[in-house]
Amino acid sequence: MSSVYEQIGGEPAMAAAVELFYRKVLGDERISHFFETVDMERQAAKQKAFLTMVCGGPANYSGKDMREGHRPLVQRGLNETHFNAVAGHLKETLEELGVSAELVGKVMAVAEGARADVLNR
């Protein structure tokens, strides 16, 4: 059986997803302020590598773990509402790109599995 990464469409699909995802995130006043000082090109590359890895593609992610990477944001007020907004944008992005409901569900299950670490619980 092929990986979720392959089923979604591999690298080109992942690149398109990350670009669309960050357009949504940066356009959302509930969460955009968390990215004001972020190098978005670097952030998008890290996000693409992370999503590729968790979807079963080539594991080239070398960023911080979720807990460590998000700790400064939690200190700035990152909470459930913000996590839900980001997860919602991820789901919408995948749906807009024509990813099947089954695969969207698999990706969202991975995202949900990261909630405790992202929120440093």
Image (spheres, grey):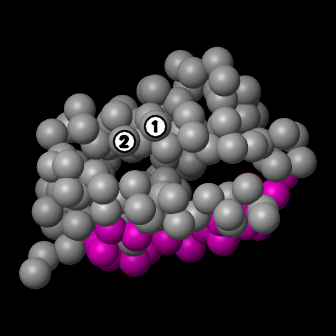
Tag 2: amino acid:
Lys
Image coords of residue 29 (percent x, y): 64, 18
Query: How much space separates mark 2 and mark 1, taking CA atoms?
Result: 5 Å
Tag 1: amino acid:
Gly
Is residue 66 on the magenta stretch? yes
**Residue at horizontal 10 percent and vertical 81 percent from the top:** 1
Of 5 and 91, the residue lying toward us: 91
**Residue at horizontal 14 percent and vertical 62 percent from the top:** 7
Image coords of residue 82 (percent x, y): 66, 37
Residue range of the region highlighted in magenta in the rendering = 54-72
The secondary element bearing badge 1 is classed as helix
- Placement of the C terminus among the 4 image quadrants: bottom right
Seen from this angle, which residue lies furthest right? 75
Q: For residue 39, what is the image quadrant? A: top right
Compared with 70, 92 (above or below) is: above
Of 70 and 41, the residue lying toward us: 70
Is residue 97 on the magenta stretch? no
**Residue at horizontal 23 percent and vertical 32 percent from the top:** 96
Image coords of residue 117 (percent x, y): 69, 66
Task: Check disc 1 and report the residue beneath it.
Answer: 88
> Relative to 43, is 73 on the left or the right?
right
> Relative to 36, is 88 on the left or the right?
left
The secondary element bearing badge 2 is classed as helix
10 Å crowding of disc 1: few (<14), some (14-19), many (20+): some
Number of on-image labels: 2
Pointers 2 and 1 in contact (C-beta within 8 Å): yes
Task: Check disc 2 and report the residue beneath it.
Answer: 91
